[in-house]
Amino acid sequence: MTGHFLVVGETLVDLVPAGGDDDVFVRRIGGGPTNVAAGLARLDNAPLLWSCLGDDPMAAFLRRRLDELGLAGPYVERAPDSKTTLAHVTHDGAGDRTFTFYRERPADVHLSVGAVPDEQLAKLDWVVVGGIALATDRARTAILELLERATSAGCTVVYDPNARPSLWTDEPFERTAREVLEYTDIVCGSVADCRTAGFDGETPAALAQSLLSTGVHTVVLTQGVNGSLLRATANSPVGPTAIDHPGYSVSVTDTTGAGDGFLAGLLDGIKGGADDPWRWLDRANAAGALTTTARGAVSAFPNATEIETLQKKQSIGRR
């Protein structure tokens, strides 16, 4: 039901190769946080989205897509005289993607302090944050102010580091990650992104313990074809927990948005899976895997029936 989740961050345009033709590109709505919001909407958990659009033609395209996705709510701000960030996406032979960003006077830096009022936070269960909106001082200040109030309101804060350190010009990415973690309950990200954020650990399990030492109560790490893991402390609602999931086997077309689809599946699993963390992780892995089977990201996100069909087909047992 709309209102349980607030997702915070940038909305941008992905320029994606059309089929196998690297000379022809199509535009897709993108941005890690907006992808997560779209993934939740696909799973009938449409969230509120706090983002900011410019006033150029690309922004008009994004607003139409947000309308279609049911995400153009009251906290999608507009910034005059700003431009839409473009992410040029390229793929290797295995479908893994690389992003090149074109970012001039970006709209997402204009997030306003206090845009989401306290009375709205009081109605929320979850605040989900991450992405490149945190890369600039103005938006970072607004987001951190929101997280402080969200914590006081009793919201569970989820952070996806989603590292793009080359875009951090005001302060190092590692420092931003530490600032966000002060308000975070659950970290969900890739092993590579969490290491880029400055956390150590020779193994993914050791890396998870390093993140738990910051005070977060749950860490979920994605490992691509090697699946994922979940580690939680006694402060977690499910108590001390250690789960490893091997992941689902699918034919990969495009990995764009796989982590965002995973996070949307995880949040949907937590909301629907009560106190069973295996169900959370299993649903997340299925959602992330299915996201890679079509060109995306948003157009590739699975619905609940598609997730459940894959779960039944491969029937991965508890580990």
Image (spheres, rainbow, N blue to C red):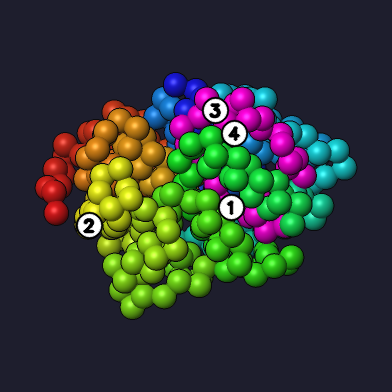
Whole-percent x and y of residue 299? 48, 37
Residue 279 belongs to magenta span: no
Neighbour tally class for label 1: few under 14, some 14-19, many 20 plus, Cα within 10 Å = many
**Tag on residue 122?**
3
Whichever of labels 1 and 2 marks the residue nearer the N terminus, that label is: 1
Above or below, 305 relative to 231:
above
Q: Secondary structure at mark 1?
A: loop
Marks 1 and 3, how far apart at CA = 24 Å
Q: Which segment did they paint magenta?
A: 110-136
Marks 2 and 4, how far apart at CA = 32 Å
Residue at the extreme front:
152
Q: Secondary structure at mark 3?
A: loop
Marks 3 and 4, how far apart at CA = 16 Å
Q: Quadrant of residue 178?
A: bottom right
Whole-percent x and y of residue 313? 16, 39
Q: Are marks 3 and 4 in contact (CB under 8 Å)?
A: no
Whichever of labels 3 and 4 marks the residue nearer the N terminus, that label is: 4
Residue drawn 56% across the image and 24% down it:
70
Residue tagged 1: 131
Residue tagged 2: 242
The amino acid marked with disc number 1 is Gly
Q: Quadrant of residue 172?
A: bottom right
Q: Left or right: where does residue 119 sit relative to residue 138? A: left
Marks 2 and 3, how far apart at CA = 31 Å
Q: Left or right: where does residue 43 sit relative to residue 242? A: right
Residue tagged 4: 49
The amino acid marked with disc number 4 is Leu
Residue 130 belongs to magenta span: yes
Residue drawn 52% across the image and 25% down it:
123
Marks 4 and 1, how far apart at CA = 13 Å
The amino acid marked with disc number 3 is Ala
